[in-house]
Amino acid sequence: MAKVAIICGLLLIGLGLVGYMGHEPAKASADGVAATGGTDSAAESSSEGDAEEKPAKKSVTALIPAFVGILLAFFGALAMKESMRMHAMHGAATVGLLGALAGAGRGAMGLGKFFSGDPSLNQRSFLFVWLMALICGVFVFLCIQSFIAARKQREAEQAS
């Protein structure tokens, strides 16, 4: 399971880096020209200009999967040492559970917009949040299966 933790950690790090470094095209205005914030009315300028400049800025929140992945990889590396395995894998499972809950919770907030076809939904962010939840959820499932198998093996050894 230590290797699985490292692999899931690397997947999450890659997901976070792609989310942060990835390119989002600039939104076009009604006439098809990339918006620069210059419109006829001052009210439209301030509301539309701010909304259209945001995709150009990189948000550190896009790196959240990478932060979770770093922790998973760290605990996976610790688990390579036999004396640290049990505690490190429980730490990794906890991080994975928190990542799955955070991703699913954040993704659930966008489900209404997704199913209604709301254009204000950042579909890329929505996808990445659910991918983080999926990776972490699968990791937690595998951890639970491993913990059950380890307990059965330990009980079988004690019985014999």
Image (tube, helix red, strand yellow):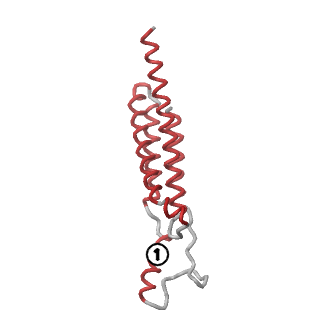
Q: Which amino acid does label 1 sit on?
A: Ala
Check disc 1 and report its element: helix, strand or loop: helix
Residue 46 figure quarter: bottom left
- Measured as percent of width and height from the top left, residue 33 is found at 59, 83
Nearest to the observer: residue 32 or residue 108: 108
Nearest to the observer: residue 117 or residue 82: 117
Nearest to the observer: residue 43 or residue 114: 114
- Measured as percent of width and height from the top left, residue 141 is found at 49, 36
Task: Tell me if residue 7 comes above or below residue 115 in the rendering.
Answer: above
Nearest to the observer: residue 85 or residue 160: 160
Q: How many labels does the image show?
A: 1
Task: Tell me if residue 154 comes above or below residue 6 in the rendering.
Answer: above
Please name the residue shown 43% across and 59% down the image: 61
- Measured as percent of width and height from the top left, residue 100 is found at 45, 46
Please name the residue shown 46% across and 72% down the image: 54
Please name the residue shown 55% across and 75% down the image: 27
Task: Tell me if residue 144 comes above or below residue 158 in the rendering.
Answer: below
| Quadrant of the drawing holding the C terminus | top left
Outermost residue on the right side: it is 32
Residue position marked by numbered label 1 in the rendering: 51
User: Callout 1: 10 Å neighbours few (<14), some, many (20+)?
Assistant: few
- Measured as percent of width and height from the top left, residue 131 is found at 53, 51
Residue 91 figure quarter: top left
Please name the residue shown 54% across and 62% down the image: 115
